[in-house]
Image: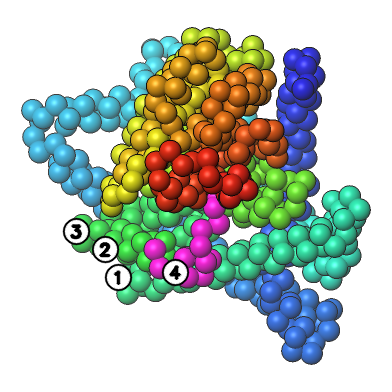
């Protein structure tokens, strides 16, 4: 077990590496953004290149044709969008009076008279924002010199040259990624293979196919979404429909919030330009209807079942990528998150991405149940157990959640990580949750001859709860069950067996420990009552052991119940007092864990 110093060193190392990686991504974003865009385009264009290759075209020709189509599409859409942006910039100032009138109308809808407090608030804010600060008499107005034409040109040339340079780098990198796909794949396999070439090859190929198929389907769906928005706005006579459709297409890559962001510009523009409120409402309904259809019909059809991404993780990832790379990072956050998640599902070295980004529970049910009990949150622990019981059955929950939780509590208590008070709380809460789970069991039916069973906890209260779990799972129509108290002396157990006269005695033990005491108790019972069948329940243990002198040793409650069920017809078939006539070979090993 690693020491505290080792754990602290690992945590410090992980923190330093994470901070350094984020710093490099931010500082070198001018390099990483084109690389990320090139990877995204390579995944999106990969299916098209593969389709052309299957049509007997060579790799180089297929890549050239695909890239040419991409360039023509981007150039055409870019030209039209640029035209519309220019026209919009010239139109809005000419519609100043109409926009002011619409704003006044919107204000009157919320504040119909001057006595309305909301209307007074709007007037005060408008006055505060619109009032110019009076300049005192005699004040000197200092006018700064206008920048030279070279400075103005440089202010435009520098950003434009950076964007064009990144675009050229992205274009060239995408072409070479498509041309050298196999070489790049083999290098990735060499780095991640760790000697397992076959397994890594299958994982990388599967991950790349899934990512490529997903991103291509996403591109088609988002493009169709923008196209329908454009056509719908054209039918509604909303100007600059192509611009709004382009914005809707791009913003739909932003997880969960993209559609809402994309509908704001056309709705506001329609509200400012139209005579009434019918058109902006229609635009809003168009976006919402189409988004509902995509989310509930087309996305499940195209993507199959959910990718398994957590909503919170996607939103956090969007915030991180936006902080690192700005608007480009916001748009790429969805594809980048999907790539990392799929890579984590298929490549062992990146499994931590599944934990960070997935929507599956990070903890197994038994660990989650125990973790909530250690936090003294019995309500959530009960929810975990009841949810599993409804999905399977109560008996399975006893073995898969409650018994492991008791074993974990015993282990942590022995290691000094859990004090006696917390152990008592966990044991008591587990017993109460077990009763809740047992209420979900179907009612017992039928009647049969009852056989007496005495269940003896080997040591403490945790084993007493385990004995209660076994008792809850036995049909009262077939079994008369008595659970001995915990911390009972061996002599007291002997007296209880003599008084109760059971046909079967079950010794309940839980790891860790308890073996020596159970062995001692078993020896005493075997000597005093040789005709009583002894079953040792080493529940929760994965060790395949058996106790000499016991008729059986089981490692799960289900195995013990099955063993008792197999013993029942043999015990009830004999006349009273004739248990000795049954050969031992018929009773031992009739059930297995």
Q: Which one is closest to the eye, mark 4 or mark 3?
A: 4
Q: Which residue is mark 3?
A: 276
Residue 533 x, y percent position in the rendering: 53, 36
Q: Which residue is mark 2?
A: 282
N-term-proximal mark, 2 vs 4 = 2
At horizontal 43% and vertical 55% (from top left) the residue drawn is: 259
Q: Which one is closest to the eye, mark 1 or mark 4?
A: 4
Q: Which residue is mark 1?
A: 236
Q: Which residue is mark 4?
A: 298
Q: Which one is closest to the eye, mark 3 or mark 1?
A: 1
Q: In the picture provided, is 134 more to the left or to the right than 407?
A: left
Q: Is residue 57 magenta?
A: no
Up/down of 114 relative to 309, above or below: above
Residue 430 x, y percent position in the rendering: 43, 26
Q: Is residue 303 magenta?
A: yes
Residue 127 x, y percent position in the rendering: 26, 27
At horizontal 49% and vertical 41% (from top left) the residue drawn is: 579
| Extreme-bottom residue of the structure | 56
Magenta residues (range): 296-310
Q: Give the spatial CA distance, label 3 vs label 1.
A: 13 Å
Asked if the residues shown at circle 2 and circle 4 are in contact, with their CB atoms under 8 angstroms apart, the answer is: no
Q: Give the spatial CA distance, label 2 vs label 3.
A: 11 Å
Label of residue 473 in the image: none
Does any portion of residue 357 appear in the rendered image?
yes
Q: Give the spatial CA distance, label 2 vs label 4.
A: 22 Å
């Amino acid at each position: 077990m690693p020491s505290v110093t080792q754990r602290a060193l690992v945590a410090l190392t992980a923190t330093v590496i994470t901070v350094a990686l984020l710093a490099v991504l931010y500082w070198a974003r001018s390099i990483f953004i084109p690389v990320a865009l090139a990877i995204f385009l390579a995944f999106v264009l990969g299916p098209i290149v593969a389709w052309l290759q299957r049509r007997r075209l060579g790799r180089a020709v297929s890549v050239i044709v695909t890239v040419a189509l991409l360039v023509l599409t981007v150039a055409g859409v870019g030209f039209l969008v640029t035209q519309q942006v220019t026209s919009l910039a010239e139109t809005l100032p000419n519609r100043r009076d109409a926009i002011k009138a619409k704003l006044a109308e919107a204000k009157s809808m919320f504040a119909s008279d001057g006595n309305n407090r909301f209307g007074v608030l709007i007037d005060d804010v408008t006055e505060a924002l619109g009032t110019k600060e009076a300049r005192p008499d005699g004040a000197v107005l200092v006018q700064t010199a206008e920048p030279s034409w070279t400075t103005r040109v440089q202010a435009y040339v520098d950003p434009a040259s950076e964007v064009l340079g990144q675009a050229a780098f992205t274009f060239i990198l995408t072409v070479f990624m498509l041309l050298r796909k196999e070489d790049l794949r083999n290098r990735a396999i060499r780095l991640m293979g760790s000697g397992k070439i076959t397994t890594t090859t299958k994982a990388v190929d599967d991950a790349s196919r899934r990512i490529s198929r997903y991103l291509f389907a996403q591109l088609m769906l988002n493009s169709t979404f923008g196209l329908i928005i454009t056509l719908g706005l054209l039918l509604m006579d909303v100007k600059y429909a192509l611009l709004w459709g382009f914005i809707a297409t791009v913003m739909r890559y932003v997880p969960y919030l993209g559609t809402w962001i994309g509908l704001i510009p056309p709705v506001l523009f329609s509200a400012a330009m139209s005579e009434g409120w019918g058109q902006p409402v229609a635009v809003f309904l168009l976006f919402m209807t189409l988004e509902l259809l995509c989310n509930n019909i087309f996305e499940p059809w195209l993507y199959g079942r959910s990718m398994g991404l957590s909503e919170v993780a996607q939103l956090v990832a969007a915030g991180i990528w936006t902080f690192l790379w700005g608007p480009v990072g916001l748009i790429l956050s969805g594809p980048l998150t999907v790539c990392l998640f799929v890579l984590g599902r298929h490549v062992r070295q990146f499994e931590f991405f599944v934990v960070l980004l997935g929507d599956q529970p990070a903890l197994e049910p038994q660990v989650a149940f125990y973790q909530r009990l250690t936090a003294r949150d019995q309500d959530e622990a009960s929810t975990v157990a009841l949810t599993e019981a409804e999905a399977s059955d109560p008996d399975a929950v006893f073995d898969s959640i409650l018994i492991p939780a008791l074993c974990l509590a015993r282990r942590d208590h022995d290691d000094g990580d859990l004090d006696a008070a917390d152990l008592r709380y966990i044991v008591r809460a587990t017993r109460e949750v077990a009763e809740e789970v047992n209420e979900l069991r179907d009612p017992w039916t039928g009647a049969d001859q009852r056989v007496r069973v005495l269940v003896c906890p080997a040591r403490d209260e945790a084993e007493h709860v385990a004995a209660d779990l076994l008792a809850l799972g036995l049909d009262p129509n077939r079994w008369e069950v008595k659970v001995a108290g915990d911390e009972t002396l061996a002599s007291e157990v002997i007296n209880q067996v003599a008084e109760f006269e059971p046909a079967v005695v079950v010794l309940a033990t839980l790891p860790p420990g308890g073996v020596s005491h159970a062995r001692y108790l078993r020896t005493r019972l075997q000597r005093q009552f040789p005709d009583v069948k002894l079953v040792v329940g080493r529940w929760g243990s994965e060790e395949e052991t058996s106790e000499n002198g016991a008729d059986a040793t089981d490692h799960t409650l289900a195995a013990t119940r099955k063993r008792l069920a197999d013993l029942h017809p043999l015990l009830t078939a004999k006349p009273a007092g004739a248990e000795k006539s049954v050969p031992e070979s018929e009773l031992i090993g009739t059930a297995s864990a």
